[in-house]
Image: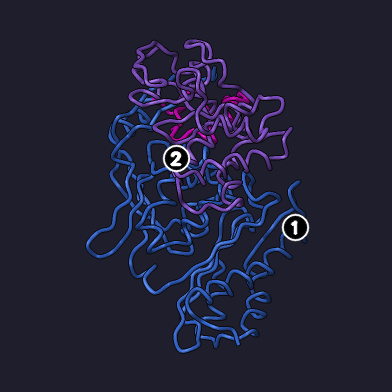
Amino acid sequence: MFNFKSYAKAGSIQEAIELLGKNPEAHLIAGGTDMLVKLHKGKAQFDHLVDIHDIAELNFITQNDAGDITIGALACFTKVAESELIRKHIPVLSQAILTIGGPQVRNMATIGGNLCNGVPSADSATPLIALNAVVTIEGSKGPRQMPLESFFLSPSRVALAQHEILTAITVTRDNYADYFGHFHKYAMREAMDISTIGCSAVCKIKDGSLQDLRLAFGVAAPVPIRCKGTEDNVRGCKINPKLLADIAKYVSADVRPRTSWRAAKEFRLQIITTLAQRVVEQAILNAGGTLQ
Amino acid sequence: MNRYICFTVNGKKKEIRVDVRQSLLEVLREQLGLLRVKQGCAGGECGACTVLLDDAPIDACLYLAVWADGKSIRTVEGESRDDRLSRVQQAFVDEGAVQCGICTPGFVMAATSLVEKHKQQKVSRYDIRRGLAGNLCRCTGYDTIVTAVQKCLDDDD
């Protein structure tokens, strides 16, 4: 039996916000795959739960008339990865999600939970920040939106006030149309493992030049990050092998890896420079480019 | 902290009272006596507690019993009919895909879902391994298990 002291089930976003407002110590529980493991180990900070598992209005994937794609925070990983919309328009997100856990975990874990957990290794985070995803947050003062990239504050801390809920993640059409991407997760095992380094790249090419590149890393800093310095340095450059060498050179200035039991800082930096080249190369190939 | 839930377990409707702090695994084993659903790691790593929730595999250890309200659960107890093993169970026997047995009920359910989802599709051994990646077996080395699943997928019926 899990050891929590109080439990309230919310049937709607509004009800969840009210329940959070009533108990300042309350935490949201969604898919449970992170929270219940922590509860199993007796973590006292999760004594009071507001259960949003079954809020139907948060479980959807839609595209509006403008072409923008919105994913409800409670869509489970399997639903997102197998969605025709996602596979057609932002396949890099499906690719990243299919490296998370195993089938059972992906059937339970939610995309919103993965982001709100706020860990630097969240594998759904790097493709989404590379796609300039925007999150919608609702709270007692109404809804607000912010770039996903600024949602991550520090390890396990995100820009959510106690009374707020992440409700949706949106990728606008201009951020995915004509962009091609690739993801790679470096881990010790091919499944059921946590990223040592995760890397996402999306790019747009034209006439043999890199019109735009967006490069994101997980576990390369205290939070999932974009490599803006590298992106600015290579935007508009001719696509050739030298470009990849330049990316490897620039990327170390954008990252701040650290040593953990999983890997030493120096090893992480080695993986980062290698993946930056390989992942960008594959993204360029996916976009129909060549590196000759 | 009790709630009533109404759900289907192996085709039979059940209405029972559960504590909101109970996992689905605890309710299946302790209240419904379905002891072939095993607890391994209790942390979503090993898959010994795999059951099908609306035909998709989940780890019953990381799933609150209250969430099963209105859902349909399948455990290995419901897979054989009139003492006849299911196709997947029979394939595990035929291939010798069993040794100590503690992972087997979970593997059979994960494999059943994989076979139902990809029936008569071309599925590589690598994809079968990925489809069973949420289940650990420390005895067999997996090869016989993958072969058992491959044979089920190749079936015509």
Quadrant location of the C terminus of chain A?
bottom right
Q: Mark 2, chain letter?
A: B
The way the protein has been coloured in the rendering is by chain
- Picture coordinates of residue A206 (x, y %)? 44, 85
Q: Is residue A40 magenta?
A: yes
| Chain painted in purple in the figure | B
For the question of whether residue A5 can be seen, the reply is: no
- Name the residue beneath numbered marker 1: A265
Q: Which is in the foreground here, disc 1 or disc 2? A: 2
Q: Relative to A16, say whether B69 is above or below.
A: above
Q: CA distance from mark 1 to mark 2?
A: 44 Å
Q: Circle 1: is it few (<14), some (14-19), or many (20+) Cα within 10 Å?
A: some
Q: Relative to B122, say whether B106 is above or below.
A: above
Q: Secondary structure at mark 2?
A: helix
Q: Relative to B25, say whether B116 is above or below.
A: below
- Picture coordinates of residue A276 (x, y %)? 63, 69
| Three-letter amino acid code at the position of disc 2 | Glu
The image quarter in which residue A221 lies: bottom right
Residue A210 is tagged as none
Say left or right for B64 vs A292: left
Q: Mark 1, chain letter?
A: A
Say left or right for B65 vs A138: right
| Three-letter amino acid code at the position of disc 1 | Lys
* Colour of the chain lettered A: blue
- Name the residue beneath numbered marker 2: B116
For the question of whether residue A252 can be seen, the reply is: yes
Q: Nearer the viewer, residue A221 or B129?
A: B129
Please state the extent of the stretch shown in magenta in the rendering: A23-48
- Picture coordinates of residue A35 (x, y %)? 53, 32
